[in-house]
Amino acid sequence: MYDMSSDGNYVVFAARDRKGEAGLWLARLDGSLPPRRVPGIEGDWAVFGRPGEIFFRSNDGSVFRVREDGTGLTKAIEEPAVRIYSISPDKQCLVVSSGQTLLYPLSGGRPINLEGDFVLHLSADGQLYFESPRVGMSATGAGVT
């Protein structure tokens, strides 16, 4: 799983390092710099939040937010998640799977159950959304970085 920044300059992704540890990595899409690991963070299913912010699922299923430099780690939602699908274009809501598809307002409040066996995807410009079937998805890690 990966996500591109709103400005189209960066990608955040989860990958295992040479020691086999699952971490979050940032890379410039123009290739001008090598990918760099977000320090001290292990997890997967990462998405960009507001500028400088990343949301991700930790190894125990908790959903956190952290700054790109690894500081400011805080729990984003209370319930564990199986996967983070997307974030709303205004960066106010996360779409996650916890056995069902839920839309979590990041300012607090109860999640909205998006009933059905589908995944909700939101376009970066906020103009489009689409649904895809939830078939054959797994939370396996990627290759070595």
Image (spheres, rainbow, N blue to C red):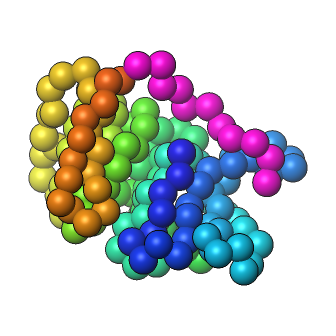
Quadrant holding the N terminus: top right
What residue is at 77 percent from the left and 72 percent from the top? Answer: 34
Q: Is residue 144 magenta?
A: yes
Q: Residue at x 65, y 62 (%)?
A: 25
Residue 58 at least partly seen: no
Q: Residue 49 in the image: x percent, y percent?
A: 37, 67
Quarter where residue 96 is shown: top left
Res 37 quadrant in image:
bottom right
Q: Give x and y (percent) for residue 142.
A: 68, 41
> In the rendered image, which quarter contains the C terminus?
bottom right
Q: Is residue 88 above or below residue 33?
A: above
Compared with 4, 44 (above or below) is: above
Q: Is any atom of residue 24 visible in this view?
A: yes
Q: Quadrant of residue 53?
A: bottom left
Q: Is residue 59 above or below residue 18?
A: above
Residues rendered magenta in the picture: 135-145
Q: Residue at x 72, y 80 (%)?
A: 32
Judge left or right: residue 84 versus residue 145: left
- Residue 76, image x, y percentages: 34, 57
Camera-side residue: 43 or 119? 119
The secondary structure that dominates the magenta segment is: loop
Front residue of this view, candidates 123 and 74 = 123
Determine if the magenta segment contains residue 77. no
Residue located 53% across and 38% down the image: 60
Using the image, determine if residue 104 lies above or below residue 97.
below
Q: Image check: 23 left or right of 56?
A: right
